Amino acid sequence: MSNLPALTPQVFSILSALIEDRLGLFFGPDYLDLVAEKLGPRVVERGFESMLDYYYFLRYDPAAEEELRAVADLLTVNETYFFRELTPLEALIGEFVAPLAATGKRVRVWCAACSTGEEPITLASLLEERGLLEQVEIVASDVSSRALAVANRGVYSGRSLRAIASPPSWLVDQGGHQLVSERLRRAVDWRLVNLLDDDAVGALGVFDAIVCRNVLIYFRDETTTRVLGRLHRALTPEGRLLVGVSESLIRLGTAFQCEERRGAFFYRKSP
Ligand SMILES: C[S@@+](CC[C@H](N)C(=O)[O-])C[C@H]1O[C@@H](n2cnc3c(N)ncnc32)[C@H](O)[C@@H]1O
């Protein structure tokens, strides 16, 4: 730690504000040491003399966009696992996706903030089980290219598998690691998307369902409201939004209304 550049409260204040503005992630004063620890080695590696120089680079340099990707990789929490918060996913399929697919429509589902891919692969496996995979287009995105690289490889072990008692047929044992079947991996369209980037979100088109779980917890209310505005625009009029079980939008007074189905809470556009 001693060889890493110092992060003063003043520089932390402007650096964390910039990070929140670009990535949404909020780091209050208690996180100064954590941010210094995570970014310090990168600052040294890139040859910057101080955290302030690094801040100026991120703020003003034309190449900052690319460097922000590295910052996202270093500061995001990519915790996720297969079959996490399963009941709401099953309810989403049973209540909305399956009935829509039964009308012959090709259903579009977006897993925003998919991390290393366990969530969209879980979704794909549930759809496969119900014979619906071919009728559903799954787009999965995250701001972390490192997380998406894991998703693209499709090789998992340890904590990713913690909710799996006996490996399903779509996981192939590779001596300690599990490889997700090519069929499920190919069923997902993986994209690098920052939820704060209007153009990138808009380019994905509109969806019948959006699964955006366990990411809003890293944002302050103002950022969450901004992101929800983008998700609102990305939903069809009858579309449904699913957030994490510990996340509630009610107190934010957004343009969504909440409804309960099969013990899970969904958000739809207010009439
Ligand atoms: C804790 S994981 C949640 C993964 C999965 N949705 C789940 O519930 O298991 C949070 C993810 O949000 C992503 N994230 C954070 N800020 C983001 C942003 N501005 N745009 C897109 N993704 C973001 C992180 O990279 C991380 O992979």
Image (cartoon, rainbow, N blue to C red):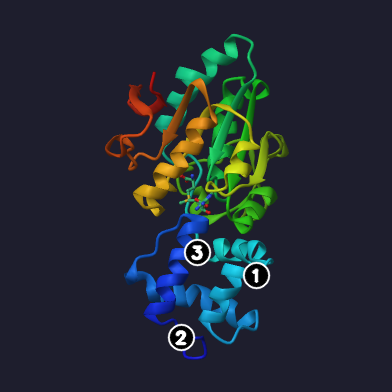
Q: Is residue 56 above or below residue 48?
A: above
Q: Amino acid at mark 1?
A: Asp
Badge 1, how many Cα within 10 Å: few under 14, some, many 20+?
few
Q: Residue at x 33, y 70 (%)?
A: 29
| Residue 78 visible, this orientation | no
* Element at label 3: helix
**Ligand 1 near label 2 (Cβ, under 8 Å)?**
no
Q: Quadrant of the C terminus?
A: top left
Q: CA distance from mark 2 to mark 1?
A: 22 Å
Image quarter of residue 64: bottom right
> Given this view, does label 3 or label 2 mark the residue nearer the observer?
2
Residue 19 visible in the current orientation: yes
**SS for callout 1:** loop
* Kind of residue at disc 2: Ala
Tell me if 237 is positioned left or right of 148 in this view.
left
Q: Within 10 angstroms of label 3, few (less than 14), some, or many (20 or more) residues?
A: some
> To which residue does mark 2 refer?
6
Crowding at label 2, few (<14), some or many (≥20) Cα neighbours within 10 Å?
some
Q: Which residue is mark 1?
A: 61
- Between disc 2 and disc 1, whose residue precedes? 2
Mark number for residue 75?
3
Hey, what amino acid is under mark 3?
Leu
Q: Is residue 207 above or below residue 179?
A: above
Whole-Å distance between the Cαs marked 3 and 1? 20 Å
